[in-house]
Image: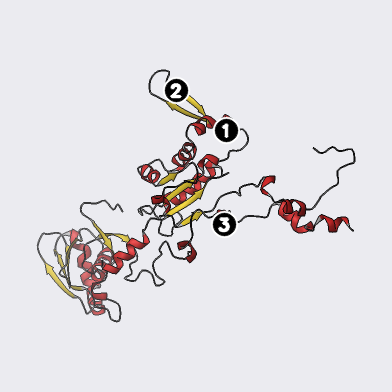
Amino acid sequence: MSQLSLFVKSGFVKAPLANGIGRYVPQCQRMTLKFCLGWGNSRGVRDFIQHDLIEFVKQNPGTVMYLKPRRHRSPVLVAEYLNGGREWFSLNDMTREEVYKWVDLYRTKAGYPDMHFKNYQHSDIPSIQGYWTPFTNKPADRNMLEFPQNSLNTPLNLKPSTSEIISKLYGEPQEQRSSR
Amino acid sequence: MSASRRVQQWLTFTRQWWLFDAKWQDPFESAKVINKHLKGAHKPIFGGHADCGDHVVVINSQDIAMRGDEWYYRVYFHHTGYPGGATWTKAWELHKKDPTMIIWKACYRDLEKDLTRRGRMQRLHIFKDSNIPKDIIQNITDQIPQLRTVPKRLKDYSQEEIEKFPKLFDYPKEHVLD
């Protein structure tokens, strides 16, 4: 999803009033299903009401469900949330299963408009061990040194040269060796 | 953002100053290491949006080294834009003209060809010898290790070290030493 949209805002994941930490308050206050008793594009909504609605409402007592039959209009779901948010969603020509999925989705939303998440995680305390700084894991003597320092020029992972290996293997003064 | 978090942000994104001694170093291999610091790629906060590049001070650029005959066959091309304005300059000629230019061009060429390149090059400070102005050297907090050791000549060893080095073979009697 593009971040550069004029209409879809971008932001970070958030939960109202630390919802879910300790207790969970369903944020969806009420949902209104508007549908027509006659037209075919409300068929799925009518099937949902006939077969699934009672069970759905029993499982989610925190959300009030209103049914609003109206003549010759397309079916619509309007969800209202505790933070004042209101979502409008068209259920036109949907099957019973599709209606169930969308109603269940709008039940679980928090009432914020759709946004592009800059990050799928969010933490108020991003780092327990502390932020990195240029001085993290750096020897303290760098503050006192005068630069340039020849000792700091040594290449990393330096292997011993052939001369050093020979000196180490046969490194004894010539006089001792000749006296043998 | 609270005051302490703001100061934390400044501290994390502080620009560091690094020193690199180019004596006897391959300029093209060195450019990769220098550019890593110019970009800030050595930091854990490095990313596409983070402006975290550091300053690098290169000293002794007149003492860089090239392999084999590279001083003679490496050619720098320039065109003035006028007809017949093309020039081809050998690396040794360019180095004689300006001893800081080869390592500058090596870094410039190795950086990404985008809008960040000029800004990063502004943070590269090259000096032909080890005389650095005081206002620059006072900023330096750390040093980039060299890629190769500077070879020692025979005259750099003390007489004691030379005598201590093991004799690996005997010359034949008729061998004449200068």
Residue plotted at (53% across, 55% down): A149
Q: Quickly name the residue at label 3.
A: A151
Q: Seen in the image, is B96 located left or right of residue B83?
A: right
Q: Position of residue A61 (x, y in %)?
A: 22, 80
- Label 1, label 2: how far apart the Cα atoms are: 20 Å
Q: Residue A75 carries which label?
A: none
A28 in relation to B122, above or below: below
Q: How far apart are marks 1 and 3 (CA)?
A: 29 Å
Mark 3 vs mark 2: give the one in front.
3
Looking at the image, which is closer to me, B98 or A51?
Answer: B98
The structure residue drawn at horizontal position 42% and vertical position 47%, both measured from the top left corner, is B133
Asked if labels 1 and 3 share a chain, the reply is no
**Quadrant in the rendering for residue A54:** bottom left
Q: Which residue is drawn at 22% across and 58% down?
A: A93
Left-right relation of A174 to B134? right
**Regarding mark 2 in the picture, which secondary structure is present there?**
strand
Q: Looking at the picture, tell me which residue is in the foreground, B35 or A121.
A: B35
Which residue has dot 1 on it?
B71
Closer to the camera: disc 1 or disc 2? 1
Q: Position of residue B7 (x, y in %)?
A: 31, 65
The image quadrant of residue A25 is bottom left
Q: Which chain carries label 2?
A: B
User: Please, what is the three-letter code of the amino acid marked with disc 3?
Assistant: Ser
